Image: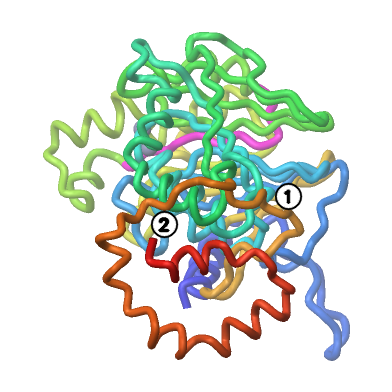
Amino acid sequence: MKRLIALLSGLALILIFGTAFAAGGKVTDPTGTAPDRYVYYPGTEALAKDEIRIIACGTGMPAARRSQAATCFLVETGNGDKFIFDIGSGSMANLAALMIPYQYLDKVFLTHLHTDHMGDIDALWAGGWTAGRPNALRVWGPSGARPDMGTKYAMDNFLKHANWDYMTRAVMISPTPGGIETTEFDYKEVNQVVYQENGVTIRSIPAIHAGDGPVSYILEYNGMKVVIGGDTFPNKWFIKYAKDADLAIHECFMDPEMFVKYYNQPPQLAWRACCAFHTSGPAFGKVMSEIQPRHAVAYHFLNEEGTRYALYEEVRSTYSGPLSMATDMMVWNITRDEITERMAVSPEEAWAVPGEAVQPPPEKGRPTEYTPYILQGRWDEETQKAQKELLDKHMNKYNLQDQDWRKQMMKKK
Ligand SMILES: [Zn+2]
Ligand SMILES: [Zn+2]
């Protein structure tokens, strides 16, 4: 239902804003198919070598809601790589709905450390760990003005906060995929390379938002350039380095009145939020007019009936080029010839399908996190009798020899 609503609102946006580049073609045969329509069905289209696909998995606000999670963009390059730019609160459900095995969802680039840009790191970390990611999660992110304001501090302390989770899963599964390998880079560096592998280069530029630390990213692949702007007031680095991007994603905040009306903010705060450490609609338009991307993407606003038209008009007061007013599950395909915008549609039940990766086995000799006191409370005999047939069948099917864990549990330690 949610997908249907997303699809319909996407269609409404497309019809109203006329930004649908994918729509079109003619149905020439009543038994045939409709060409070039608005829909992307995840898992059904191989990317061409010279193609990039970007999917908005979160476009909303810190107060995440079903129709819009907080910031997250998945960028897929034609060489098979996948990069997650921000993993805001609520975005994992959208990311999972793309039906991509977790083994490929292991690279995260954080623009900054507000939770609406990294709040679902827990769901990616533990979800991938329990569902097939064989290696540690890799996280890139900026330093801060002090060590305790940097990405390394955030990730190390995330693991501390999740210590019970880590210690208990590390016994059951394998500690390796439960690790986080953090690459922290200097937020002040301009156009520095933070990632370069298999023909993909990712650079960072500083952003200006709420304090020192935030950055934006520029991804280049096969002669194409995608810019993923983190939260920022319009800044001169973006103007310079996002120039001529194929796709330029930049925040676009609602105006102060909308924040008062829809977001319960006092007028003073609404003014600051909109226009002092974020980018307003007219300012967004001005930035895009300056950098002239092939296609501009506005996000980070409540995309709904009460807001979208006025905000669109605000953007259009300063920018007349190609534009998407992003909502969750919007998809852009980029080649040198064409940029299309569609909506990804998948069932509510869809999630990361199994891949082929094999996780490392549990660590031999790693002690359980149980004490004998708790273990002696197991209602063992009756339970084992009840599930014996089910378990024996499983053990036989997979020829499982190593039953140490089961035996150990049954011994009541
Ligand atoms: Zn922020
Ligand atoms: Zn934000």
Would you identify the image quadrant in which residue 313 lies? top left
Ligand 2 closer than 8 Å to the CB at disc 1?
no
- Please tell me which residue lies in front, 286 or 237: 237
Q: Is residue 288 left or right of residue 156?
A: right
Q: Is residue 402 above or below residue 371?
A: below
Q: Secondary structure at mark 2?
A: loop
Please tell me which residue is depicted at 76% across the width and 58% down the height of the picture. 356
Disc 2 marks a residue whose amino acid type is Gln
Amino acid beneath label 1? Asn
Q: Is 167 above or below relative to 198?
A: below
The alpha-carbon separation of the residues under discs 2 and 1 comes to 21 Å
Q: What residue is disc 2 on?
A: 68
Residue positioned 51% across, 68% down in the render: 407
Q: Which residues are magenta?
A: 243-254
Q: Quadrant of ligand 1?
A: top left
Which dot marks residue 333? 1
Residue 270 picture location, percent across and down: 20, 36
